[in-house]
Image (cartoon, coloured by chain):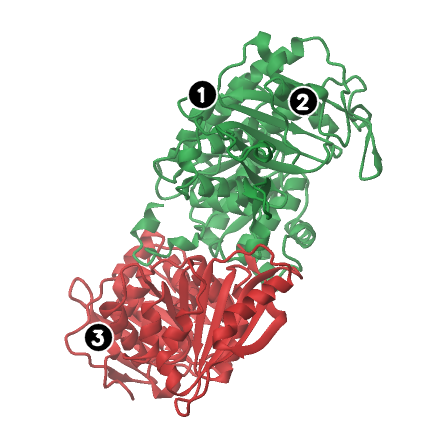
Amino acid sequence: MEEAVTATSVPPGPIEVPIDQAESAINRAWLSLGDPARARTLNLVCVCQNDAELDYAVHAARDVIPGHPGRVIVVKLDSPVGDAPVLTRVGLLEDVSKPGAYVGESLVLTVRGSAREHVATVVERLLAPGVPVVLWWLGDVPDEPSAFVRLADRSDVVTVDSSQIDLTDLTTLHRYVTQRARPTQSISDIEWLRLRPWQESLARFFDDPATLAGLSRAESLELAFHTPSRGDFASAKAALFAGWFAARLTLRTPATIRWAPRENGRALWLSRPDGQPFALTMTIDHRPGLHEGALTRVTVSSAVGDRFELEREGASRVLAWRGACAGAVLPEAVLRIGPPDTPRMLRRLLDRPERDELFLEALAQAAPWFGGGYRS
Amino acid sequence: MTTTMENPLRAGLDDERLAPPCAIVIFGASGDLTRRKLVPALYHLQLSRMLAPGSAVVGFARKDVGVEEFRREQREATAQFARSKPVDTEAWATFEPSLSYVHGTFDEPEAYARLKAHLETVDATMGTRGNRLFYFATPPEFFSVIAKHLKAAGLVADAADRSRFTRVIVEKPFGSNLESSRALDRALHEVLDESQIYRIDHYLGKEAVQNLLAFRFGNAIFEPLWRREFIDHVQITVAEEIGIEGRGKFYEGAGATRDIIQNHLFQLLMLVAMEPPSAFDADAVRDEKVKVLRALRPMSRDRIPELTARGQYGRGTLGGGLLPAYREEQDVSPNSRTETYAAMRVEIENWRWQGVPFYIRTGKRLTRRVTEIAVRFKGIPVALFGRSQAETAPNELVLRIQPDEGITLRFAAKQPGSHMVLRDVNMDFRYGATWGRTSADAYERLILDALLGDATLFARDDEVDEAWRYVSPILEAWAEMPAPSFPNYAAGTWGPASAEALVERDGRRWRRP
């Protein structure tokens, strides 16, 4: 119901300064504007591994900051070899919809060599005081000891983007959640938020008592998705969707995980609360034009002919919503899902930064399925 | 809905506030409200994917047009009035097929039979499952007529029926005095349970009004001060720059008190003065709100001239332009006694507010458009810093509802220099500058709430009743008093001298917003 506008970094700045002069450079920038009143609601710390991710993070952060004014610290973890001082570019962020209205501060750090080991302390001294820290970690989630763990430990909200990670990273993230995360800390995933229209659309099938009966008879969930990265047989997105579904239906995972080959995919046998088997199938559905691992079809079905299906039209954002279930009217509908852009997801995350139990539940359910030895 | 609660896949998704499938029937679909507000609001809900797939919007009006013509009209209206432009063609392409139309007059049983058959088709083809939201966007004299016909046609589900719902949104005015308001309530209650009636006051859908609740009950620092021991008085202002904008016929029978004070202004009063509710749900919030109105000290007739002021604008100027007098407006009697300005000093007799006057005022053709609540705190007991401190004003907290929504706190600070000189400074929070985003229109928020069955931001029957119970004797007394010497304020000013006298009598002044 709300529309966001974007901010852009404008003069004064950005200028390059030594790290120990970053704070005073920001103060000078504000003074040059007459030291206007400003609101700070958060520190947004974005950590990335390369220039492409850096650009992506800077643009996304500029997009969300008018809605969540505060300090943005973008850290590029550069080459681990060779020592060099931390390069810092600082500037102010202007709300592009309101020229002259500055809504935040931007610090872009390039950290290389041994300084990478100390990135958490480098960031910590640059945080604006008294407001929460949101860590947005782009790319692979390294296991500890790592910069990820150290920064996450200092953050109130930690978010990753599982569209950019592989299935083992889900396990790493789950380990962090279960072994280190504080009860008040919010852990989330941008990709998880992109699943919401699919979850909503599937849930809508079962708002009716007649279709709800069909759900209790369900014997299989098939997820089809565009080719995932790195040779995985499932995408992190599909894994989280399946984890959510299984957790909600209290499906049980077998003691030994054995993915059986299927045409274009693999299947895992879970069991329903009544002990009956339930098939979870992951199917690769090559659709050029989609992001790696994007969902293309979700089908819940039973042996007695119930079928509830969401299918993406081509590589579009249009879903066909159709089904058949005894005693229920299920007129076919066309649903449009929102663009999967990161700023939009980041905004939603910042709008509701509270701990997402549903995500944690889905992660806990799915992580053991991909614990190891699963690569095709 | 019970079914939603039982759906295991729904759990945890509710925070997205998605409406269940429903047929939304708008009575008065050819009117201005539908074109300007309702259909654009529904389009935005569709755009935000807050309407369920298969939701249907059915227009009902006397005008005999086909469905294609109705869709074309609404498409054009949405292009003109939607808050985000241009209209998203993809979203409209999804939304437009959900629009349909049934023509008929509000007192024609056959029209309701047609509507019923149409809704049954909608249920079968769209999956709306018998859920109905009827929006009475009609003149108030039709409210009870439509309700009776809906009941007679079998279009009202029982409130206890958990498999489907019927809800009715009723536009203000809810009556024109206590008697007519109660008659309307009786008529509606013959057909509907109170839980099915959503009396809309679009003020409550405004972000800044909801922020009043957030401000009061989401912060610990102000609540201990929010009482008679620390607050000197409160001023609530709903000032309009505009005149009656061609609504002379309506306004002649209404006036400022019925149009603004009885509803919008009393809503603000309730939100400022209420006790913390036990929960943020419809009944808990409204229970506390209505207690404020119940605690209002009735005005004895002999004190009404002293505790109220009324006015009517004469010719004047605003922004360099000449403005006509109210009596020169279209459809207004040249001898009109209708008040275009009203102010009152009200008192709330409870432990929190005993002895704290609330000055409320509203008017048309005032200096500027502003709605605000100003809470004036008591002064310091001792002026420790001498004369300069005596010149500073007591602390004041201003909650601005519109325009430029925000909050300002005034306090004294030391002026730089070698002397201890104090000056008033303002600490200013501005919504627009803090969050660079466009809020949903009040109608979007309120229609969505009604679809979700959340009545927190709608007026309950007892609130409306209590508001009329307070205001009606004042209106009656005014009607019986000698005719005031209207016009008594010039357009473009802050109102009549009698309003100034109202507060000056207590040694106070109106704030210049």
Q: Which mark is residue B337?
A: none
Question: Mark 2 packing: few (<14 Cα in 10 Å), some, or many (20+)?
Answer: some
Q: Which residue is located at x 50 percent, y 31 percent?
A: B380
Q: Of circles 1 and 3, which is in front?
A: 1
Residue A78, horizontal then vertical, whole percent: 44, 86
Q: Is residue B243 left or right of residue A76?
A: right
Q: Quadrant of residue B442?
A: top right
Numbered circles on residues, count: 3
Q: Which subunit holds the residue at mark 3? A: A
- Name the residue that disc number 2 marks: B500
Question: Which is more toward the observer, A375 or B369?
Answer: B369
Residue A73, horizontal then vertical, whole percent: 47, 71
Q: Are marks 2 and 3 on the same chain?
A: no
Chain letter for red, please. Answer: A
From the viewer's perspective, is residue B471 above or below residue B17? above
Q: Are marks 1 and 3 on the same chain?
A: no
Q: Which subunit holds the residue at mark 1? A: B
Distance of label 1 from label 3 (alpha carbons): 69 Å
Element carrying mark 1: loop
Residue B185, horizontal then vertical, whole percent: 49, 24
Look at label 2 and name its amino acid. Glu
Mark with earlier residue (2, 1)? 1
Q: Which mark is residue B354?
A: 1
Chain letter for green, please. Answer: B
